[in-house]
Image: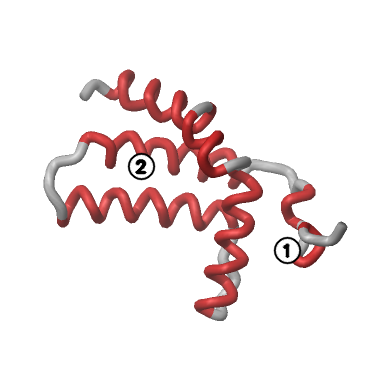
Amino acid sequence: MLPEKILKEAASLVAGKRAEQHGDYTTLHVRVADLWSSYIKYKVSPDQVALCMALVKVARAEVGGENPDDAVDAASYVALWGALKNREETPAEKPIQKLFKK
């Protein structure tokens, strides 16, 4: 698959299908960072989550069989990493308990 096609498909997923499936990427990555931090007892940031997920896709490509989706997914996570790394703090940064208060 050509790089342009990989990036185009990744952009389409991030802004479309994946956003519909998984919700706002900032909220999602903040939540995953909270869960990982709690589990491993080490502070993980939302941008680190996205970068680690890209590395999961790289590992799958190295260990598993050929899957063109791995390149698209890795490109998507790298794009999210860049966006999360350079973002301003958002309401999604609030502790999880505040998200569930009515």
Question: Where, quadrant-wise, is the N terminus in this rendering?
Answer: top left
| Residue found at x 55% / y 52% | 47
The spot of residue 3 in percent (x, y) is 29, 24
| 3 left or right, relative to 93 | left
Residue situated furthest left in the rendering: 65
The colour scheme of the drawn protein is secondary structure
Point out the tag, 2 or 1, that comes first from the N-terminus: 2
| Residue found at x 42% / y 56% | 52
The spot of residue 57 in percent (x, y) is 31, 49
| Residue found at x 12% / y 47% | 65
Q: Please state which of residues 20 and 38 is positioned toward the viewer in this rendering.
A: 20
Residue 13 vertical position relative to residue 48 in the rendered view, above or below: above
Badge 2: residue crowd in 10 Å (few <14, some 14–19, many ≥20): many
Badge 1: residue crowd in 10 Å (few <14, some 14–19, many ≥20): few
User: What residue does disc 2 label?
Assistant: 74
The amino acid marked with disc number 2 is: Ala
Task: Say what secondary structure mark 1 lies in.
Answer: helix
Gap between marks 2 and 1 measured at Cα: 27 Å
Residue 42 vertical position relative to residue 24 in the rendered view, above or below: below
Residue situated furthest right in the rendering: 102
Q: For residue 59, which quarter of the picture?
A: bottom left
The amino acid marked with disc number 1 is: Ile
- Say which of marks 2 and 1 sits in front: 1
Task: Say what secondary structure mark 2 lies in.
Answer: helix
User: What residue does disc 1 label?
Assistant: 96
| Residue found at x 58% / y 39% | 83
The spot of residue 44 in percent (x, y) is 56, 66
Residue 1 vertical position relative to residue 35 in the rendered view, above or below: above
| 58 left or right, relative to 29 | left
Question: Where, quadrant-wise, is the C terminus in this rendering?
Answer: bottom right
The spot of residue 50 in percent (x, y) is 48, 50
